[in-house]
Image (cartoon, rainbow, N blue to C red):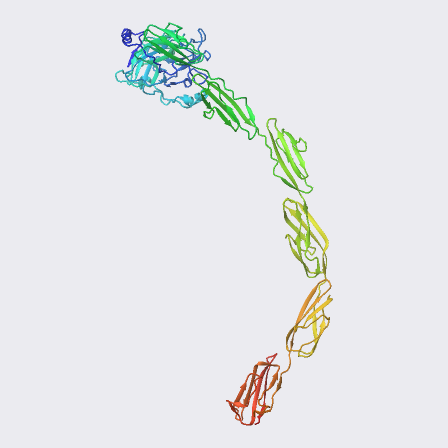
Amino acid sequence: MYVDSDNYFPMKKILLFVLVSLSSFSNAQSIVINPSFENYIAPGTFGPNFGLVTSWTDTINVGSPDYHHTSQGIGFNLSGLGPCPNGNQCGTAFHGDGVVGLYYDGGTKSEWLQGQLSTQMQIGQDYSISFYLRDPPNVNAVSDSWGILFSDSIYQNKVNPYNQFIDPINWQAWNNANPVPSPFDPSTDIDWNPATSLDQWVEVPNLVNDTNWVQYSFTMTAQSNHEYIYLGMMGDPANFQSNGIGGGLGSYVWYDSLTIVPITNSIDIIGDSLICNGDSTVLEALNDSIHNWAVDTDPSTIISSLNPITVSPSITTTYLLYGSSDTISYTVTVEDLVAPIDLGNDTTLCPGQSLTLDGTTTNGIDYLWQDNSTDTSYFVNQAGTYWVEASNNCNTELDSIIVNYSTLSIDLGPDLNLCNGDSTIMDAGNSGALYLWNDGSTDQTLTLTDDGDYWVVISDGICSASDTVSINTQELTAFFTGDNTEGCAVHTVNFMNESTVNVGTIDSVFWAFGNSETSNLMNPSTTYLSSGNYDVSLTVTTNLGCTETLSIPSYILVHPPVEADFDILSGSSNTGENLVITNNSINADNWYWDFGDNQTSTLEVPLHEYQTVGAYTILLVASNNFGCSDSTSRTITISSEPILYVPNAFSPDEDEFNNTWKIFISNIDIYDFTLNVYNRWGETIWSNHNPSVFWDGTYSGKKVPTGTYTWTISFGDLMTDERYEFNGHVTLIK
């Protein structure tokens, strides 16, 4: 439903009656946020840019509301405000420095602006509604039906970027990148039937054609818990009245100083309860005819008896209103402007340095850095552009700083090991920098030849860096030894590499032994096959490629070899006979003979006689005075012929003589021996395999009769496989 203005509509008497029937207002506050459009987010290009105005949002239907502020220059589309005449259009705000401009083209294009109430309206509560309108100069076309819509719904179809962007340039880029998918059309999107609509509205019934500000006041009983208000043309466009619209002209009005106050049964004051330092506000007394104003710090001094009054406190001030039957107070809080921020000049930091930016400023409440952090300080450890905004309810201050990092760095590389006599060049890089080496030189490079620690400090005028490198000279000494440098051919020498290096390692060696043989082993050996003097050299190479060679002439002396040799020229292989030996050894000065029977000799040509049979190895070791020696051996077999003695008679008569028959035999194989005795009929009466056993003249335990008996003896040779057989007779006498 709608309520008409009590300034211009015939229902004025009825509305006045309603006002008279109500008792005086209480000390109620207006529930409109930023009612005079004073507060904005950040300075920038205003005009059609309601993303910058605190708590107000463009509904983005067919056009866009305009925001005009005294901080902007006057020009086309009224981006600024100023005294008339000045520019195409001009004027000043009714209160403060900001106004809203809305446009209607006479057809369906009607600009709307949406705001959110500080508190929801309460069903059944009466509200006093007031706003100011004016027709800017030089706008010939005018229309009626301007007013305020109250709703539970959000009709805007684009997100308010207030909480997303601060920088107006960024907001505009966002706005351009997010076109409206389906424009909001109040003529079709809102139910304008008062009997069925969930919304309520108040509208001006007359043409708004006054270039001065005109206040329009209404009372309304809330039929819902309205949370949002909309400024624009109310109702069906078919019912709008206009004058002079056409030919590209349209109706254009300014809004200022909105108040929506719940009506209670006591005297009340309406006006801004929060202003910025330097601003003013209008305080209006409601529901009383006596208006005596004072401040609580001097309550007895009346500062004004007018209603309303304009006040401009520099500090938070509580105003007293003495009415006809009641006294109330109203506090106007004064918030100081945020002081400018100073992050300091753009700066360059050195590698590893950091910087803490302090965005704290006087009167700053909320802080926002470039990465959306909200602390008062910001820790910087990398290059970039950093900015911070400090804001309160009055204004926002911004400052930025560019932080660069010096690229100065120095690395002389790892410590170096040089070969003795070599040099290296150290380059500190960073062409154009200032250099200082430990020896006082100031060039970019320094040639190093000696052991030591070398440092350099470089500077680019802002930062400095340094590095140190240690140089160690690799002192290499080649040296070797042989375990036996003199000997007789064939002569083997084991070599030991005893080379040393002070730093690093010896990685490879090369030996030349003078006998056409070489080696890459650390500790090799070689054999000299012939006599002579031999030069030996060793070349060693380190991990750095440093080399050193040691050559020793005639390091190895090889004498001619001793050759041991002998022959047995004459003699017998039987026991008891001398052997005749010839010594055929070459290059020998000393001889040692071992005959294999525990007998030895050092004569050059010895004589030797073996006493027992057997196989004997004769060893000759020939040597000279240089320690060379050689040996050879021969094996000789010493033997003897068998000896056999057989008695031809015995007398087993139990006297003291010849009671048994026993043979004597030697130089035979005793394990291959058989002795048999036969009687006259050829019957064996005694047999034996042990030459040392005797016969006692019995057979089967009985004495045999006197007579002659035949015997046979067979045996093997002691040294050969030859066998012998003998036979004979023995006479048994009793």
Image position of 714 with respect to 15: above or below: below
Q: Is 436 situated above or below 717?
A: above
Please state the total of marks drawn on the protein image. 0
Q: Where residue 102 sits in the image (x, y, percent)?
A: 38, 13
Where is residue 178, by image quadrant?
Answer: top left
Quadrant into which the N terminus falls: top left
Q: Is residue 113 left or right of residue 45?
A: left
- 651 sits to left or right of 375: right
Q: Quadrant of residue 601?
A: bottom right
Instruction: Pick whichever, 529 or 640, lies toward us.
Output: 640
Q: Is residue 47 left or right of residue 451?
A: left
Q: Is residue 271 visible?
A: no
Residue 701 visible from this viewpoint: yes
- Image position of 548 with respect to 290: above or below: below
- Please state if 281 lies on the left or on the right of 505 as rendered: left
Q: Residue 611 or 659: which is nearer the viewer?
A: 659
Measured from the top left, where is residue 108 in percent x and y? 34, 15
Q: Residue 489: where, in percent of width, then height? A: 70, 61
Q: Position of residue 75 (x, y in %)?
A: 45, 11
Location of the C terminus (image quadrant)? bottom right
Closer to us: 85 or 149:
149
Q: To which quarter of the image does residue 597 belong?
A: bottom right
